[in-house]
Amino acid sequence: MNSDRQPATDMRRLHKQNERRILVITLVTLTVVGGGLIGLFFGPIEMLAALPCLLGGAGAILGLWLLLVWVEHWLEKR
């Protein structure tokens, strides 16, 4: 037996971790960077006015992701 063998990589777990990381990066970029740019170009009052729209967009992205995760989980159980 060769003792230099690497343990098997769980690609499914890595894929799910990468999906979550990309989701978090997307939501943070949309809200923080988008809000910051609006605040920088238009001012803090307009940034506060745009915040509900940015959060609504982030919520829509999160909702769609949760729906897809639920469908994936449902299909795996079948």
Image (tube, rainbow, N blue to C red):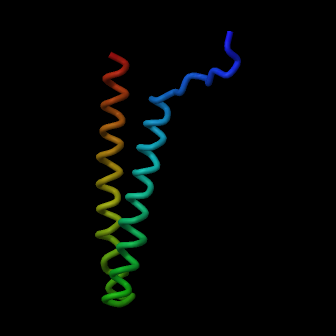
Give the farthest residue toward the top.
Answer: 1
For the point 35% across and 51% down, which residue is it? Answer: 62
Residue 15: which quarter of the image?
top left
For the point 38% across and 58% down, which residue is it? Answer: 26
Residue 51 spot, x, y in % from top left: 35, 74
Q: Is residue 40 above or below residue 14?
A: below
Residue 70 spot, x, y in % from top left: 35, 34
Q: Is residue 63 above or below residue 52?
A: above
Residue 25 spot, x, y in % from top left: 43, 58
Image quarter hosting the N terminus: top right
Front residue of 5/76: it is 5
Name the side, left or right, on which 48 lies relative to 14.
Answer: left
Total marks drawn?
0
Front residue of 5/52: it is 5
Give the farthest residue toward the right.
Answer: 3
Name the side, left or right, on which 17 lies relative to 41.
Answer: right
For the point 51% across and 27% down, which residue is it? Answer: 10
Residue 8 spot, x, y in % from top left: 56, 22
For the point 31% across and 53% down, which residue is it? Answer: 61
Image quarter hosting the C terminus: top left
Front residue of 78/23: it is 23
